[in-house]
């Protein structure tokens, strides 16, 4: 009985081996091709990461540094035509302008920051369409910077008389981080002023009231009283 069982098991094993051989004969090429493709894909990504992306990020960070330094000085001391031109196109202490950096290293972290810088420079130089273009290409997880970017976008749209777009981005600026006690009341105040100026009184009241209720210690908390009074909310 045991001998018969052994024979049966041997036959089953042989059949399994034969089926495996048949399967491999039929599908070995597709399996090899798919496996090779996966290896190439993983290897290609590893090579890109280590030999392209990382070096590009490092090079872009090095190139943008002088432009960022000059831009920081402008944000503190005021924007002027010559400095804006140097930041955008290079010149003086700036060896590589942010526009060239965007073209050559647009996919890097520094390239992303370059969009913010370019957008702000275009806004302050009065080129509002290019300001919108670059600011919309910028994004970051740093909430205060993202709030600033949305506020600049809203300002650019307001200058273009695109009031619906402007209000949308003022609202986006408000929504980035509702707990930020510096940037959020600033965004609410600007949103309120814009809504009031464009005849959206109800929304203006809501923005101003949020400052008083959610950010009573902010610099705008007492300032909004005069706007609320004019809108009939305070006697």
Image: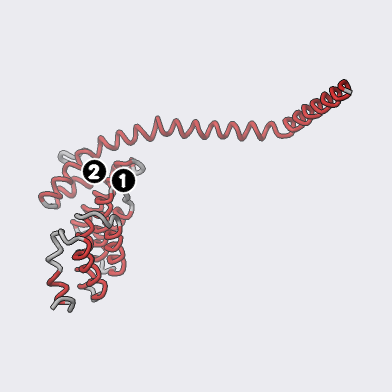
Q: Which mark is residue 197?
A: none
For label 1, the residue is 112
Q: Which residue is label 2 attached to?
A: 97
Tell me how far mark 2 sits from mark 1, CA to CA.
Answer: 14 Å
Mark 1: few/some/many CA within 10 Å (<14, 14-19, 20+): many
Q: Quadrant of the C terminus?
A: bottom left
Horizontal relation, residue 38 to residue 24: left or right:
left
Give residue 92's position: percent from left, percent from top.
15, 40
The quarter of the picture where residue 180 lies is: bottom left
Between label 2 and label 1, give the one nearer the viewer. 1
**Marks 1 and 2: in contact by CB < 8 Å?**
no
Indicate the quadrant containing the N terminus: top left, top right, bottom left or bottom right: top right
Q: Secondary structure at mark 2?
A: loop
- The residue drawn where x is 23% and y is 73% is 198
Q: At 88% from the left edge and 20% from the top edge, which residue is drawn?
A: 3
The spot of residue 169 in percent (x, y) is 29, 62
Vertical position of residue 170 compared to residue 75: above or below: below
Q: Residue at x 17, y 61 (%)?
A: 216
Residue lying at 27% horizontally and 60% vertically, measured from the top left: 174
Image quadrant of residue 200? bottom left
* Front residue of 87 and 115: 115
């Amino acid at each position: 009985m045991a001998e018969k069982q052994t024979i049966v098991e041997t036959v089953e094993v042989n059949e399994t081996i034969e089926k495996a051989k048949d399967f491999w004969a039929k599908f070995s090429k597709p399996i090899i091709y798919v496996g090779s493709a996966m290896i190439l894909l993983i290897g290609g990504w590893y090579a890109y990461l280590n030999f392209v992306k990382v070096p590009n990020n490092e090079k872009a960070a090095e190139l943008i540094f002088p432009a960022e330094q000059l831009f920081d000085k402008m944000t503190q001391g005021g924007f002027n035509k010559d400095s804006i031109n140097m930041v955008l196109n290079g010149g003086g202490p700036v060896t590589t302008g942010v526009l060239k950096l965007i073209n050559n290293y647009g996919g890097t972290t520094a390239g992303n920051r370059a969009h913010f810088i370019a957008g702000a420079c275009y806004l302050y130089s009065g080129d509002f369409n290019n300001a919108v273009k670059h600011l919309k290409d910028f994004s970051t997880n740093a909430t205060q910077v993202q709030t600033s970017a949305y506020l600049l976008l809203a300002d650019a749209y307001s200058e273009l008389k695109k009031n619906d777009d402007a209000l949308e981005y003022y609202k986006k600026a408000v929504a980035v981080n509702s707990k930020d006690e510096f940037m959020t009341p600033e965004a609410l105040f600007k949103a309120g002023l814009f809504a009031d100026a464009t005849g959206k009184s109800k929304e203006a009241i809501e923005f101003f009231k949020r400052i008083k209720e959610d950010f009573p210690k902010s610099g705008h908390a007492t300032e909004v009283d005069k706007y609320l009074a004019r809108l009939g909310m305070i006697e």
